[in-house]
Image (cartoon, rainbow, N blue to C red):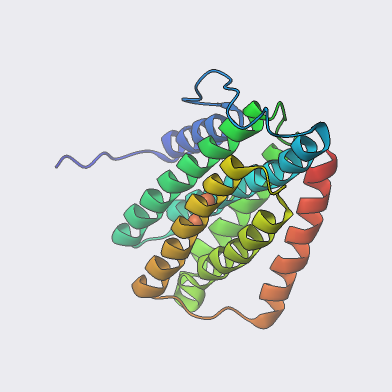
Amino acid sequence: MEIKHHSSLDNLIEEIEYAVDCIYNKGNIPEKSSINKVNLSKDESKASERVMRINHMGEICAQGLYRGQAAHTKDQNLKMKLYDICNEENEHLKLCNLRLKELNGSSSVLNPLWYLSSYVLGSVAGIKENDWKLGFIEETERQVTDHLKESMKQLPANDIRSKEFLEKISKDEERHRDTVKRIGSNEIPNSIKTGMNISSKIMKKLTSLF
Ligand SMILES: [Fe+2]
Ligand SMILES: [Fe+2]
């Protein structure tokens, strides 16, 4: 197989293109459907929109983290694995985009900021790979799985479709966690875990507002 040699500028352009596509491209979303919409009252629809908007932001962040770590790791096998998982996060993003559109909702205007900050964190994890290996990503996937369980409880009982989407996503996130554990991850310090938890709470709050 031919190995492409990219210059730093090529890499930078590729990363920017991916980020823009991730944040703004609604890619492959079928035209608005009326599935399950009819069953939801205005209030229920609003509640579902809030849940899906936050999960949409989570999928943006996941891709920032994976791309950042992949760009900075020297381990080529790990790099490919990170890109594979990132592709699945992109599928999750499409599901969240689709559901948001069906609910007449919109994504957060802060998403570029969340992508960028996640990318920086992922890059730090990539640079510190000898200490943390994949510990940072393992912890992220663990917190995401917990968050998804909470999200499913917050959905109106009528909103079967959003629940189905989140169940599918949750299964994948659990698998991601197992995958990074298998590749080898070190536990990150508790102070970082707590910091991640607090910052995700702040991000969720801001995302629900803006
Ligand atoms: Fe995901
Ligand atoms: Fe994941």
Residue 68 in sight? no
Judge left or right: residue 111 versus residue 21: right
Q: Residue at x 82, y 51 (%)?
A: 205
User: Looking at this view, is 188 or 200 the one in front?
Assistant: 200
Q: Is residue 148 above or below residue 33?
A: below
Left or right: 47 as drawn, with respect to 176? right
Residue 125: percent from left, percent from top: 54, 65
Screen quadrant of the N terminus: top left
For residue 144, say whether it is visible.
Answer: yes
Residue beneath the point at 51% across and 25% down: 29
Give the left or right position of residue 16, taking residue 146 as reference: left
Residue at the image point whose x is 57% and y is 63% from the top: 145
**Residue farthest to the top, as pictured:** 31
Of residue 155 and residue 99, the one placed in the foreground of this image is 155
The percent coordinates of residue 175 (x first, y second) are 41, 63
Residue 98, position as x, y percentages in the image: 57, 31
Residue placed furthest toward the right: 209
User: Across the whole image, how many numbered discs are drawn on residues?
Assistant: 0
Q: Nearer the viewer, residue 181 or 148?
A: 148
Residue 74 image position (x, y, % from top left):
37, 61
> The C terminus appears in which quarter of the rendering?
top right
